[in-house]
Image: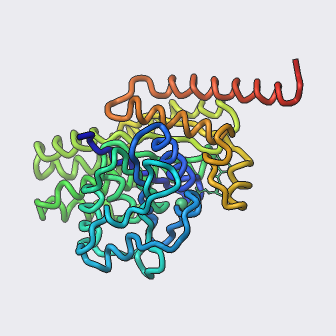
Amino acid sequence: MESTTIIPIASGKGGVGKTLLCANLCIALAKLGHSTVAVDLDLGGSNLYTCLGVPNKYPGIGDFLKADGAKSLQDLAVPTSVEGLSFIPGDGSSAFTANITHDQRKTLMKGIKSLKQRFVILDLGAGTSFNSLNFFGMAPYGIIITTFETPAIMNAVMFLRNFAFRAASGMVRPYPAVLADVVERIGRPAAVGEAPVTVRGLFDVIARHDQTLAARVEKALARYRPRIVFNMGDSPQELSILDRLDATVRQGLCLEPDFFGFIFYDDIVRQSAKRREVLLLKYPGSAASRGIIGLARKVIGSWDGPLASSGELLKEQAAQQFEALAARKGQESGAP
Ligand SMILES: Nc1ncnc2c1ncn2[C@@H]1O[C@H](COP(=O)(O)OP(=O)(O)OP(=O)(O)O)[C@@H](O)[C@H]1O
Ligand SMILES: [Mg+2]
């Protein structure tokens, strides 16, 4: 039997394209022959059905939680018009699902882990809620999507910082004295002139209790490889920020990032959303669709394992996409 790969899609800032990517990546994966389920985990703000072209009338996560584990999540998967692709809706008509309890979150994560499709893609809520941080931690490789705007990039880093803190706290939970110090250090506001606590600073707090535990937490964190996808790009030159971003994540957060995808800004995305058209089905040749199909091929070919020189590879791929787009525009305008 084929193994299942869970891919959470998160972002620090809202509105950067998680849902658009989730829906169309799922369609591309299914069309390339891999059974896929799209799960709407943006609890309190679920709208993945719109990008998939599915009506908002099916029970989903809200109903699963109300049934308190008595329903199977797999049974809630709705088939879509794309062969091999199903969809698990979010909160639907259930109110207050953004505020689920720790136990509900555990039930939900167990349900997600029991899904059997080849790919399980999670559309998360923006920002650093415990829901999004915990769902992001369900897999060693998860996508962080951002635009090139400074606030979006800053918030992506902020998301990963909070993620590292949350993961480290989770790992020391069995040691109440360590946990108490870790939680105190994370929660303590920096004094005037003092730098805010870093991930390395947190390892030091743990090491004061137990050096082996600190080394274990550091090693466990290093196994997470956030995969950064840039959306709404104008030109491949924007990727000149990669080295700085790489250093920030690697040194500041003790996490190793991979640079995984580049999707161009494309007017057709918003136009199709207004007309309730599904981007990849209606406009498979558009710049945004091509970027997402390229990303799906990369997921299929090289998701499970560290990527070598991911930044350099992404720069090359973005440059190729840009040239292909320019050539197409040239042909359309009749230029020689
Ligand atoms: N490549 C793109 N080119 C142009 N517009 C885009 C692109 N990607 C996304 N958009 C537009 O940006 C807006 C936000 O996209 P989307 O809803 O997917 O973001 P999100 O991260 O899921 O937002 P939220 O945080 O609210 O869940 C939408 O109007 C979408 O049509
Ligand atoms: Mg969304």
Q: Please indicate whether residue 104 sits to the left or right of residue 271 in the image.
A: left
Is residue 318 at least partly visible in the picture? yes
Left/right placement of residue 157 relative to residue 7 reads: right
Residue 313 place in picture, x, y as percent: 50, 24
Compared with 36, 129 (above or below) is: below
From the top left corner, tell me how far across and down residue 80 is, in percent: 49, 57
Q: Is residue 233 above or below residue 98?
A: above
* Point 46% across, 44% down: residue: 30
Can residue 128 be seen from the camera position used here?
A: no
Image: 78 above or below 95 = above
Quarter assignment of residue 91: bottom left
Q: Which residue is at the front of the view, 321 or 14?
A: 321
At x 36%, y 53%, the residue is 136
**At which x and y percent is residue 112?**
30, 58
Taking the image as shown, residue 333 lies to the left or right of residue 33, namely right
Q: Quadrant of the C terminus?
A: top right
Determine the image quadrant of residue 257: top left
